[in-house]
Image (spheres, grey):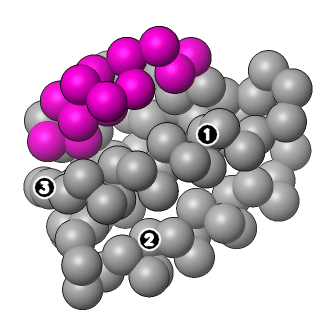
Amino acid sequence: MAGQVYLDTLTEWERILDGLLRSDGDIRMDLSGLTFVDVAGATSLARTAQRLPGDRRIMVRRPPASLRRVLELFWPELVAIEVVE
């Protein structure tokens, strides 16, 4: 992933997230190339994590600070998303 997630790119971001739901096991996303994720993009990620069956998780590697802050603020107890460095 590279660039920014905001209103103009949200549809593509959600398409990617929907595709990840069809995979097996934990989802690993390298977000080191993203420079910004707005609240709508973070919401889409959180909703995707909430839709994962069982104890599956989304592990995001090096997310932009904006995404990390929004996740901590609005979904502090969402264990289905794990931030890794």
Question: What is the distance, in whole Å, between disc 3 and disc 2 at their CAs?
Answer: 14 Å
Element at label 2: helix
The residue beneath circle 3 is: 35
Question: What is the distance, in whole Å, between disc 1 and disc 2 at their CAs?
Answer: 14 Å
Q: Earlier in the sequence, mark 1 or mark 2?
A: 2
Verify whether residue 78 appears in magenta.
yes
Q: Position of residue 67 (x, y in %)?
A: 24, 41
Residue 13 numbered tag: 2
Residue 49 numbered tag: 1
Residue type at the position of mark 2: Trp
Q: Main secondary structure of the magenta part?
A: helix
Q: Residues within 10 Å of mark 2 (few under 14, many from 20)?
A: some
Is residue 66 visible from the viewing direction of this image? yes
Q: Position of residue 79 (x, y in %)?
A: 56, 17
Quadrant housing the N terminus: bottom left
Q: Residue at x 52, y 28 (%)?
A: 81
Residue type at the position of mark 1: Ala
Is residue 34 visible from the viewing direction of this image? no
